[in-house]
Amino acid sequence: MLVFSAFVIACSHSDQVSTDSRESGDGEDESHNPGQNCASCHNVSGSEAVREGGWWTVAGTVFSNGTSPQKNATIELWEKPNKQGKLIKRLVSDSKGNFYTNQTIDFNGGCYPSITVGSKTIYMNQKFNGGSCNSCHGVSTGKLTIN
């Protein structure tokens, strides 16, 4: 079971998105610290991580096993469980298994994530209202792993 926790988006975040949209992508390798809680730095007003990297509204790491990053995984946020309803956001993990976006996401109604690699998909069937994936995964629950 996947578990996510909520975090708050500062007003200054919308200024960054309008001038500098950023998302992870297949083959990119500029991210760092796989498995760590991205929001601990990329969600702190005035931090160097936000100034130089971005303010992430959704971020985390996917592994192919307990230690190897899963590149090119598709992470989707859906309105309803099991990829039902409206697709809210689609991201792709980079070469370090990290995925992130600074795009504004409306978490008020909650959403349900899925991760797909090839023909295998894993689902979180519990509604979540945030995008700080590694604040739980790898800490109080298992890492996001698909193999």
Image (cartoon, helix red, strand yellow):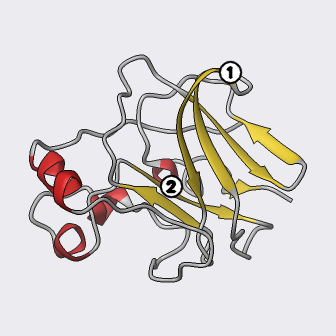
Q: Nearer the viewer, residue 35 or 27?
A: 27
Element assignment for label 1: loop
Residue 22 image offset from top left, x and y in percent:
35, 62
Say whether residue 69 is left or right of residue 41. Answer: right
Q: Nearer the viewer, residue 87 or 56?
A: 87
Amino acid type at circle 2 is Asn
Q: Give the quadrant of the N terminus.
A: top right
Residue 88 lies, with reference to residue 44, above or below; the image says: above
Residue 63 image offset from top left, x and y in percent:
71, 65
- Distance, label 2 to label 1, CA atoms, is 20 Å
Amino acid type at circle 1 is Pro
Q: In which quadrant of the rendered view does residue 55 lie?
A: bottom left
User: Which disc number belongs to residue 81?
Assistant: 1
Task: Name the residue: 63% across, 48% down.
Answer: 75
In the picture of the structure, the residue carrying the numbered disc 2 is 134
Residue 123 lies, with reference to residue 30, above or below; the image says: above
Q: In which quadrant of the rendered view does residue 34 lie?
A: bottom right
Q: Give the quadrant of the C terminus.
A: bottom right
